[in-house]
Image: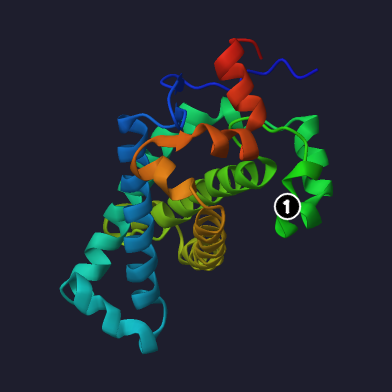
Amino acid sequence: MNSQTEVAPGDGVHPGNPVKVDRYTTAARINHWITAASLVLLAISGLALFHPSLFFLTKLFGGGEMTRMLHPWIGVVLFFSFMGLFFRFWRLNLWNRTDNVWLSRLRDVLGGHDENLPEVGKYNAGQKMVFWSMSILIIVLITSGLVIWQQYFSQYTTVDQQRVAMLVHAIAAIVVICVWIVHVYAAIWVRGTISAMTRGQVTGGWAWRHHRRWLKELVTGKP
C-alpha cells in the first residue's frame, strides 16, 4: 500500500450540491500563471531570434535589440517562478508503482475508460512526466542561457563553449515547447481541469473520476 501523502497545504473538501474540492491555493495559481506567461513570452522571443523568417515577432517586444535584451531576463523570471512551483509540488510528483500501472494502460487513458485505471493521487503519471520534464529542461535552459548571455558572462566562457551552449539551448527550447503543447492539450482534453487553475476548485465528481486516491485522503485524512 502506498503511504505517500497526496494532499498539499490548502487542499480541502466542501460539502454541498455539488461537492467542491479545493485543488490550488491563490498563491499557487498566481505562481502557475506567472510561469506560464513567462514561458510563452520566452518561446515567442526565442523563436523571433532563432530564424530570420520569424524575426517579425520582435515587433511584439519593441524591435530586435529590445527582444535580445528582454529574452534572458524573462528567462530569469521563468526560472525563479518555476522554482516556486517545484518546491510546492515536488513531493506530490514522486513516482510510485501506481504510475507504472497507469502508464501501462495508456490506451484506456486515451480512450476515456477510467474504470480500467488505478486510483491516482493528486497527479497522474502523465502530469508527473510533464512536471519532471519541465524541471530538467528549465535547468538546462537557464544554465545554457547564462553561457550565451554575452553581456554579463562572455568573459567566463570560450567561443566553442558558447556554440555548444547555443545548440543545447535551442534543442531544449524546442522540447520545452513540445512539452508545453502536450500540457495545454491535456488540460483542455480533460474537461474541468482548467477551472482548477483559474478558480482553484474542482467538483467532487471530477476529483472522484480523475484523482480518487487524492479525494479519499482528503476525506479520510489517511494516505
Query: Considering the numbered disc 1 on the image, is that residue within a helix, a strand or a loop?
Result: helix
**Label 1: how many residues lie within 10 Å, few (<14), some (14-19) or many (20+)?**
some
Expressed as whole percent of the image width and height from the top left, the position of residue 140 reads 52, 51
Instruction: Identify which residue is drawn at 40% across, 61% down.
Output: 148
Question: Is residue 101 toward the left or the right of residue 6 in the image?
Answer: right
> Visible in this render: residue 155?
no
Residue 221 falls in which quadrant of the image?
top right
Q: Nearer the viewer, residue 93 or 167?
A: 93
- The C terminus appears in which quarter of the rendering? top right
User: What colour scheme does the image use?
Assistant: rainbow
Q: Give the farthest residue toward the top.
A: 221
Please state if 4 lies on the left or on the right of 55 as rendered: right
The total number of labels drawn is 1
Residue 21 showing in the rendered view: yes
Residue depicted at x 58% and y 31%: 122
Residue 14 in the figure: left or right of residue 152: right
Kindly identify the residue that appears in the image at 82 percent across and 49 percent down: 105
Q: In the depicted view, which residue is nearer to us: 113 or 175?
A: 113
Residue furthest out toward the left: 62
Of the pair 25 and 137, the residue shown nearer to us: 25
Please tell me in which quadrant of the rendered image residue 53 appears: bottom left
Give the position of the N terminus as an image quadrant.
top right
Q: Report the residue at 59% width, 48% height from top.
A: 130
Q: Which amino acid does label 1 sit on?
A: Val
> Measured along the vertical axis of the image, is residue 57 above or below residue 28?
below
Looking at the image, which residue sits at the far bottom? 53
Q: Mark 1 points at which residue?
A: 109
Percent of width and height locating residue 142: 43, 50
* Up/down of 9 relative to 131, above or below: above
Percent coordinates x, y for residue 20 in the rendering: 44, 29
Q: Along the line of sight, which residue is nearer the eye, 16 or 194?
A: 16
Residue 117 rendering spot, x and y as whole percentages: 77, 41
